[in-house]
Image (tube, helix red, strand yellow):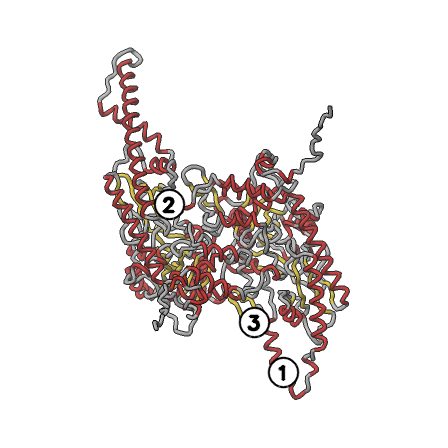
Amino acid sequence: MVLSKAVPSSSHDASLDCTFASRYVRDPLPRFKLPEESIPKEAAYQVINDELMLDGNPRLNLASFVTTWMEPECDKLIMAALNKNYVDMDEYPITTELQNRCVNMIAHLFNAPIGEEETAVGVGTVGSSEAIMLAGLAFKRKWQNKRKTEGMPYDKPNIVTGANVQVCWEKFARYFEVDLKEVKLKEGYYVMDPEKAVAMVDENTICVAAILGSTLTGEFEDVKKLNELLTEKNKETGWDVPIHVDAASGGFIAPFLYKDLVWDFRLPLVKSINVSGHKYGLVYAGVGWVVWRSKEDLPDELVFHINYLGADQPTFTLNFSKGSSQIIAQYYQFIRLGFEGYKNIIENCMENAKVLRQGLEQTGKFNIVSKEVGVPLVAFALKDRTYYTVFDISENLRRFGWIVPAYTMPADAQHIAVLRVVVREDFSRSLAERLVSDIHKVVQELDEQVKHVTKVVTTQVDITARGGGTDGALVHKSEQEIAEEVITYWKKLVSHKKTSGVC
Amino acid sequence: MVLSKTASESDVSIHSTFASRYVRASLPRFRMPENSIPKEAAYQIINDELMLDGNPRLNLASFVTTWMEPECDKLMMAAVNKNYVDMDEYPVTTELQNRCVNMIAHLFNAPLGESETAVGVGTVGSSEAIMLAGLAFKRKWQNKRKEQGLPYDKPNIVTGANVQVCWEKFARYFEVELKEVKLSEGYYVMDPEKAVQMVDENTICVAAILGSTLNGEFEDVKLLNDLLTKKNAETGWDTPIHVDAASGGFIAPFLYPELEWDFRLPLVKSINVSGHKYGLVYAGIGWCIWRTKEDLPEELIFHINYLGADQPTFTLNFSKGSSQVIAQYYQLIRLGFEGYKNIMENCQENAMVLKEGLEKTGRFNIVSKDNGVPLVAFSLKDNSRHDEFEVSEFLRRFGWIVPAYTMPPDAQNITVLRVVIREDFSRTLAERLVLDIQKVLHELDVMPSKKDIDIQKTKSVAAAWKRFVEDKKKTNGIC
């Protein structure tokens, strides 16, 4: 009999292994040191992709204003531009031109006083943080120059804003050595009070910053009133203090929904405005814009002139090399949507915000803190905070997949805590209805839990009361005392979760 | 007879883009258009106009990466809608950034214990990284001077005149004086001796460059460290060093591991490197690493509390995309040490091929050194009839973008052409470039030089050329 022998293959080619059969998914992923050897690209891709599955789903992240969905055609353009370094103005003149067109379109949207042939003064940035730093730098330098010519001290510049400012203003103040004078909020009034702001202005104030679309409640500050009061004060004092409008969220909402609201360059004291392209400009994270009223408002000494084969290209940015994708995407949105497109989208957002607001009001458990006029978001607080807080609701909503952040208000309203849902372009009505029903569920669950725990704790207290103190005597607790103990127990549970600081 | 009539009443939306009216209408430039247009038309119009941009891969002026593997492109596209700053919502992305910081810190020999985490941050590029590092130095110096009761209003920084423009930006925007060590013909980097001489009590740091923008040279950081240590011992000023390793940071550890330039030198307190240069990631990522916690003043760090752990942040930008951070991590684990080494060795090889090809023409002086960033900087031996700017312009016609620059003071009379060898510049491309440069030289040889024109036309022609060339004179605003 012939015995057939199966000769095993001499060498196993590791590259034939399917990724999940290979050793790469057995080895721990490098964390602190660069690994010695290379690994196949499929393995690298799979390993990273899989770990990233544990990140939150961007589209269910209701905490952020930043765009999370764009049309596939735009994705194609973004992909194609990934390897273009935006700062190479000479090599990529079209991309540079697209940036300039965006600046002009935005300047006109904000009613900048430019003539027919004039080009607007502005720049594309990585976001509103960079935009605000550039605007602040311009104000600081202008003020310093003015004080130098007057022979006055210029070492203590300050800026007046509301306590509701986004953290980038605090960064600007700290990094560029400008004093931040904040107008405190109070319960029921969560934006900067123009009268208090103007009262705080002094000779060292480089500008007053108003917010169009407060991060916390979406409200628009009354820039017109601020302009009037500040004009009066300027006349009395001769200080000539200007205004900057932080329109990070509101800049792409007010022109489409509230055309009659006067907040932009139509007000003479407004010298610069910033807006985030990646919020309601409807572009992915990574683009912002700052526009100045006129050339005079941007000191030339801050502008770097780079000469590349031809025209002089003035630049004023903090970042140098960066990708071109978001600039191209912004231009795509401008010409794709046009005025009517943006208007329709924002109107839809407002409608869906209304649906959400009404759904929440119907539960009877919430106070709506945000206003109807403003950025399409809904900020709401619990009517009754004795047994659980908004932080508990936020945590429980996570189980359903929703990311809804809870924050405490800044000074002097720190006792108010709210949940905030931002309604972005891709938050449809069906999602709004589903969110309302999930919030219902969470609240019901928490109510059930309270009843259950109250029973348990009360029973404990009861047993202790009946079981006795040290001398065996009966200790009777009144209902009031029992209630107080339960509350203290719950308070301890929730107090460690209070935080502040909101994006 | 029945006449059939085809009325073109078809729905406008079924028109092929190039049949529609959208390619007839002029594109909006200054004002937002009133109406929307179909997405296909928007895509096509923009795509077509962008065809007139240069080809990124033939852009030999830039160090910034222009090619990545398709698997990485997939990861980037998937992450384009993730806002990097939402650390709480995207904890894994945040973790990947931290891993990159640690890997790079170890690569630079930061003095960390086994379980210690590195101090560093991901930025949008070396510009932001340098501003953060400079801010840290400035604040440390101010605090020290306040304690000593000495004036702290005139901080300065000592660098070479060959610094990239972001140092000038830092100086101008953050009100720090820039004291530049001038170059000289044949010596195009910062002289450590002259630098140390310029240090005074107001100097917040001395900045050395590993991989000078103009000719790729590595500055002698070790010598600077030795000289500065001596001066510090004499004066008691404790002046630190920052190394701008934007290009060199991902080259020296792989090609020149014995070169001491990083945290092995005690005075080096922070280092920046561009992830988007030889870190091999697309534009938009840089890294700044500090030696220890003490080198980063706590008052500059913002603490943001989001539902749980405290997340300290120190960046100028807030919201930005996550794609490049994920791509950097991909490259670090995909390539590993051997992968990066192989790629840098290939770049070095191809740079040699280009250099030898140019030397063989007999028409060029090579200005760059062999040791350094893989690039070739060269100038014409004889530029009396035609200069480097003309060579650069003629090369454009072949599709190559090769920039020409004048050196900064005091070597402004030297003009160079510079070719950066990136990962995707293969040997065939190097050989083709040499051929095309030879063609350009032949063309220029037969072209009349500006000086051969007869006297009567000299004035008008000279004026015309002057304007033409003046506009092209490159300044030191180079990337």
Q: Quadrant of the N terminus of chain A?
A: top right
- The x, y position of residue A283, in whole percent, is 43, 55
- The x, y position of residue A134, in whole percent, is 45, 59
Same-chain status of marks 2 and 1:
no
Tag 3: amino acid = Gly
Disc 1 sits on a residue from what chain?
A: B
Q: Secondary structure at mark 2?
A: loop
Tag 3: Cα neighbours inside 10 Å, few (<14), some, or many (≥20)? some
Between B152 and B467, which is closer to the camera in this rendering? Answer: B467
Tag 2: amino acid = Leu
Marks 3 and 1 in Cβ contact (< 8 Å): no
- The x, y position of residue B346, in whole percent, is 69, 52
Q: Gap in Å between the C-alphas at discs 2 and 1?
A: 65 Å
Please name the residue that numbered disc 3 is placed on. Answer: A310
Same-chain status of marks 3 and 1:
no
Tag 1: amino acid = Val
Residue A62: numbered disc: 2
Please name the residue that numbered disc 1 is placed on. Answer: B461
Question: In this rendering, does residue B439 appear at all?
Answer: yes
- Residue for point 51% across, 58% down: A324
Tag 1: Cα neighbours inside 10 Å, few (<14), some, or many (≥20)? some
Residue A104, image quadrant: bottom left
- Residue for point 69% across, 59% down: B428
Q: Is residue A52 above or below residue B450?
A: above
Marks 2 and 1 in Cβ contact (< 8 Å): no
Dot 3 or dot 2: first in sequence order is 2
- The x, y position of residue A124, in whole percent, is 46, 60
